[in-house]
Image: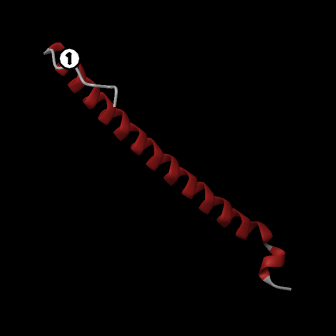
Amino acid sequence: MNAVTFFPNKSNNRDRYSKKTQLKSLVSRTDEKFNTWIVTVEDRWLEEIAACLEGNFPDWRS
């Protein structure tokens, strides 16, 4: 018998911790990308509204 037989939870805990860390990293990056996207959309939206107020209406047909 080896140590894994006596302490099976040690390996499982490491795997669980690793997966949890990966998930946190993924969620963090996803939130970051989403926030960046929102800011970009807001910036473009404001530019389009400003252009419309100046009488420069975009051609949305294409």
Q: Residue furthest front?
A: 62
Q: Quick one: quadrant of the N terminus? A: bottom right
**Does 24 appear above or below 19?**
above
Q: Residue at x 83, y 75 (%)?
A: 6
**Does 32 appear above or below 26?**
above
Q: Residue furthest right?
A: 1
Of residues 42 and 9, the one drawn nearer to the viewer in this rendering: 42
Of residues 35 and 9, the one drawn nearer to the viewer in this rendering: 35
- Residue type at mark 1 is Cys
Across and down, in percent, residue 51 comes to 17, 21
Q: Quick one: quadrant of the C terminus? A: top left
Is 52 left or right of 9, judged from the image as shown? left
- Quadrant of res 41: top left
**Does 39 appear above or below 12?**
above
**Does 27 appear above or below 54?**
below
Q: Residue furthest bottom?
A: 1
Q: Residue at x 20, y 17 (%)?
A: 52
Provide the residue designation for mark 1: 52
Count of number-bearing discs: 1
Is 32 left or right of 58, judged from the image as shown? right
Picture colour scheme: secondary structure
Q: Secondary structure at mark 1?
A: helix
